[in-house]
Image (cartoon, rainbow, N blue to C red):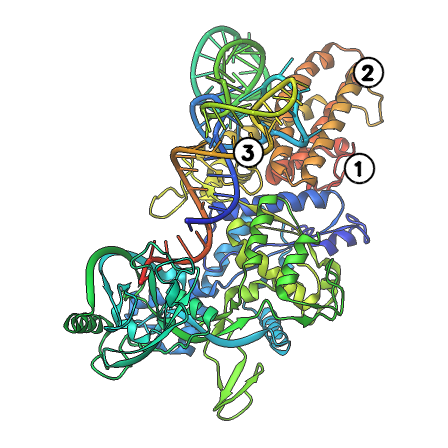
Amino acid sequence: HSGYFSPEKCVTDGIAHPEAEIFSMVLPPPNVTGILHMGHALMLAIEDTLVRYHRMQGKRVLWIPGTDSAAIATQNRVEKDIQKNERKSRHDLGREEMLKRIDAFVEESKSTIIHQTRRVGSSLDWSRYAYTMDDTRYEAVMEAFIRMHTAGLIYRSNRIVNWDPKGQTTISDDEIVYEERTAKLYTFTYSKDFPIAISTTRPETKVGDTAVAVHPDDTRYQHLIGTSYDVVFCDVPLHITIIADESVEMDFGTGALGVTPAHSQIDWAIADRHNLPRPQVINEYAKMTVTGRLSGLKVSDARDAVATWLEEEGLLIKTEDITQNVSTAERTGAIIEPLPKLQWWVDVNKPFVIPHSEIVGIPSGSTTTLKDIMRLSVTEGSITFVTDRYERIYMDWINKLGPWCISRQIWFGHRIPVWYKGDDTKVQITSPGEGWVQDPDVLDTWFSSGLWTFSTLGWPHNKTDLGTYHPTSLIETGHDIIFFWVARMVLMSGFLLGQVPFKTVYMHGLVRDGQGRKISKSLGNNIDPLLMAEKYGMDAVRVSLIAGTAPGTDSRISEDKIRGYKHFANKLWNMSRFVLSSIHDMPESNISYTESDNIIVGELSTLIETVEKHFATYRIDLALETIYQFVWHRFADEIIEDSKSIIVHGDTSAKQSRQALLRTCLFTSLKLLHPYMPYVTEAIWQHIPNHLRRNERALLMVSAWPQR
RNA sequence: GGGCGGUUAGCUCAGUUGGUAGAGCAGCUCGUUUACACCGAGAAGGUCGGGGGUUCAAGUCCCUCACCGCCCACCA
């Protein structure tokens, strides 16, 4: 192992100049518990190609590897295993034991993904390997939380969560299964003299209503907007105000919406806009908490009870059957109950003074907001997107951005460093003492991921690497995590360092199967990159992923395509063998080219220039196509073919010129292809006898990029 | 419902500021005592999704329609 994946080693050995330009990048950390799929392979192929290109350019290149704890996914996985094998829930095990089990699982499975990542040929600096939950990253996360809290940007407030009454837990959107069911839509009024009828599939929640919302343009209800009514609904006294809100559909039902702030996400949002009270009427066990006839009933029983009551009172106007999507919990099958719960938030709109900033448009010492950091980093040009389209998507999202909920009701993750004792609250890492209880929640996994570009460089303690390699040159990642990850990195880096996390954003698309379908377990259309590598070689896999794949667009992979590029690797091997045998007796001294050979040297020059131009715009697919075209159809089909007679029948000067040309063409081809096909090109390079290799370096990987 | 992509050769995709349509793969014909059959030579194949507009000139710019796909919000 050469150690040249480390930029310091390259400097020590004279491969990179100590003052050489930096090219730095972090690997989007794959899930510790995952196995390598084509999406990873694409990411690694693109990134490794870029990294190798820049390394050969003589830059100081750093590419940092790591793995991600993927909190929810990992905890889920382990919980499912335990449920299956031991028939126990996490509550049966308890927090401490559960975390031990998860850590053990992570420890066992992480070597798989690490090993597989290396296998792709990734020239990552493994001496800097990081895990989102290791000690250094833990310190970074705690530091970040405390600093943001101190700056007043983190606060605690209620939010409607997806509550699973059976599992007694909050669940993420990913764990929701939508089931289509028929439901009854009831249309009724709250009382005899209430002026507007409303429709709902959940009449039991109406005891929590505080308003009726109509569309501001709805002529039927214009005159009622702003009025309010006191009614007694199913023994519960309600105060209902008629409000106007744009979100109401005039055409649905009666065009009027009964607003239940505490038990519906949209209604919560309406309550936000209109400052409505938000009484909770359903508890964690999905039972009614009101007094009167509904007291203590399960929601399903309460629904029937309300329907009966409406009928008895003569308030029910009609019932109809509709189909609707019911949210159920993936694991327990229970119907999700939306409930308000205290959560931690990051306020993206609150002004604060940024002490130090290198971001264009945000001077040090100025007052700014996190949203402005995210916005100006891009609009003022500190960050460039390779594909314009993603810049627009990013900006649209930023402009509509609300507070970021950072607490998660799971156990695996960075636990929130907040302690409670009675009404007292303290924000610190360790327990303040006897009787203090830590917040049970953990942080959103993207909170720690947001720190990734600098937590991997040793922040907040070791600042040496930080000064050298941050901001990183490039982030290359899937377009599906532009909001989750890319935007959060900009936020975190901007707030904590006053820097952008990266200068350029390259987003790749989804890898689909040969028919353009998403790769999924249920379709069984997975193409295993490592299996393909065994059959056709890793270079063929890498090239088939990059060829014909423009940045940001989805691509297709098929075994046929991979096989095709195996042919190319084979062709390259054969060409090299032939060229080396044709030039074994060439003179050591420099010779002068014949006129016709000199023209070909010029072609090479143009080729190199074209490749560099494409790399500069991240069109590595086009660069590859150009090289492929030259190597196969110009170099092999024409130049080598013509050489056969020149070397046998030509005069000495023609022969020697041609031999020198073949050597140059071969070396250039190998160098240009090395970033894409590191295995074959390096293997061929090792077959070149020393007298032919002359003053070139022993490893192609660190050889100098060809001169134009 | 809101937004964004895509539609170019049989298949997968390029096509930079408008200037005579490109590549790979597949297919077809021919060739090869050979660096490589995981090969070579050659030919064929497209009214650039439909319609309209701007222009001397449109795959490219504008409008419109159709179909496919993705993202966000989801229907009380």
Give the residue at x 44% y 35%. Answer: A558
Horizontal and vertical percent position of residue A243: 41, 68
Q: Nearer the viewer, residue A435 or A356?
A: A356
Q: Amino acid at mark 2?
A: Glu
Residue A595 - label: 2
Instruction: Work out which quarter of the rendered image holds the C terminus of chain A and state it.
Output: top right
Residue A682 picture quarter: top right
Marks 1 and 3: which is nearer the front? 3
> Would you call the spot at circle 1 few (<14 residues within 10 Å), some (14-19), or many (20 or more)?
few
- To the question of a shared chain for discs 2 and 1, the answer is yes
Determine which residue is flagged by label 3: A548
Given the image, on which type of amino acid does mark 1 rest?
Answer: Asn
Judging from the image, what secondary structure is the residue with disc 1 in?
loop
The residue at 53%/49% (across/down) is: A479
Q: Which mark is residue A695?
A: 1
Q: Residue furthest left?
A: A312
Work out whether A676 lies above or below A233.
above
Identify residue type, mark 3: Gly
Q: Which residue is found at the position 79% from the left and 50% from the top?
A: A20
- Sequence-wise, the earlier of marks 2 and 3 is 3
